[in-house]
Amino acid sequence: MTFDNVRVPASALLGEENQGWQVIKRALAHERIGGPRYQRALVVARRLERIARERGWWERDGVRTRYVAAEAACQAARLLVYQAIDARKKDLPDDLVVSLARVAIVRSERLVADLAMELLGEEMTMDFTPTPRQTELVAQVDHAVDETGGLDRARLRLQARPRHRTRARACRGDPPW
Amino acid sequence: MIHPGELTLLERVLIAERLAWVGAATTFGLRAVVLGDTVLADTGPAGARQGLAVVNRYRGGLARYAAEAAQLLVLNEDQASLVELAPGQVEAVPSGAGFPVGRVPAELLESGRPVEALGLRARWALAMAAELGGAAHAVVELTSTHLRERVQFGRPLAHFQALRHRIANLAVDAEATRWIAREAAYSGQERPMWLAASYAAAVGAALSPDAVQLWAPAASCTSSASAT
C-alpha cells in the first residue's frame, strides 16, 4: 500500500526517516503470533476428545495417540509464543523465537484438523447446496441489483447469502479407519 | 558438590537437559530427576559408583547404562524396587545409540528393596523428555553450524531453502521439547510430564533421520543403495 501527496507531521514519525520497513517488520513480527490460535486448536481438540469418548472410540487403537500428539503440539505452540512475548518484553532479539512459534502454531492447528478429519470424516464436510429459501433470497437480490444498476453485484450477493450450515449426519458409530 | 535433594524438580530437569546437551555420558541427570531427594542420600560417599539404570518390570531386557550402573530401579505398575548391582552382574551389549546398554537378567527384576513408587514412572518419562530436549538442542546447534559451513554448488548448504525448512522444523522440535519438559517439571503434575514425554518421543523419532540426512544425504543414499 502506498500513499501519494500525503503530508505527515514530524511528530507522527515512528523511528527514523527512511527506516519505515524496519518499523513495519518489528510491528508485524508479533502480528504473526498475535492470535492465540493454539488455544482455539486446543479447544477443538478437547471437543474431539469428548466426541470420541461419547461414541466409544476413545479406547480404540490410535485415537488417544493422535489426541495426545495434537494436545502436546498445542501446548508446545503456547510455550513458544510465551517465549516470543518474553523476548519482546525484555527487548531481546525475537525474530527467531517468533518464527519458531509461528511454525509451532501452524503445526498444532494441522494436527488438530487431521484428528478432526480422521474422527469425523464426512461429518466435517460442508453442505453448499442452498436451501429453497436461500435460493429465493439470492434471486431477490439479483433482481434488486438489476433494477438499481451500478452496484457491486458480487458484493451484494455475498452479503445476502445465508451462512452455510454443517449438515448433521447420523452417527455411524464407527470412525472411518 | 550438588545434592539433587536440595533442588527443585525444575532445577533437576535443567541439569538433566544440560548434561544431555553437552553429551555427557552420565546418568546423573536421570538419577536427579527420577530419584531426587528420596533415595539419593543412600548412594554413599562422593566418588562411589552412582550410575542408575531404570527398567520396566514387565518388559525387562535392555536398559541404558545397566552394565555400568550401581543401582537398577525396577518399575512395576504402582510398585518399585531398587536393586544394588555388583560389577559384571549385567551383561553389556554392543550399542550404536551413543550410550552403553546392558541386558538385565530376569532374576534381577524380582530382587531389590521396595522404594516409594509414587510418581517415579512419570518422573522417569520426564527425565527422558529433558534429555531428549537437551540432545535435540545439541543436534540443531551442530547441524546449523554444518549447514552454514559446508559449501556445495558454490554456496553454503544453509542457502538452500529446502534444507532451511528442515532445520527450522528441527529447531521448533528442539525448543518446544525443552520448554514443554520444563513446564511439566515446574507444575510437578504427572499429566504434563506424560505429555512432555509423548512430545519428546515423537521428536526423537523424527529428528534422527532428518539430522542424518542434513549431515550426509549423499552418504545416506549410497549406504541405502548398497544395503539393498
Image: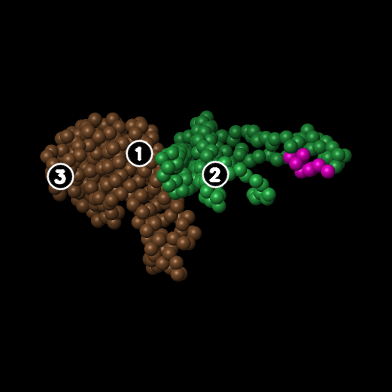
Q: What residue is pinned by disc 2?
A: A14
Q: x, y percentage for residue A150?
A: 83, 43
Mark 1–mark 3 distance (CA, rounded to whole Å): 28 Å
SS label for mark 1: helix
Nearer the observer: mark 1 or 3; the answer is: 1
- Magenta highlight range: A150-158
Name the one closer to the observer, A26 or A97: A26
Residues at discs 1 and 3 both on one chain = yes
Exactly how many numbered labels are in the figure? 3
The residue located at (20%, 37%) in the rendering is B3
Amino acid at circle 1: Arg
**Label 2: how many Cα within 10 Å (few below 14, some 14–19, many 20+):** few
Chain drawn brown in the picture: B
**Which colour is chain A painted?**
green
User: From mark 2 to mark 3, how far is it between C-alphas?
Assistant: 63 Å
- Residue B123's place in the image compared with B24, above or below, is above
Dot 3, crowdedness within 10 Å: few (<14), some or many (≥20)?
Answer: some
Where residue B49 is drawn, which disc sits there? 3
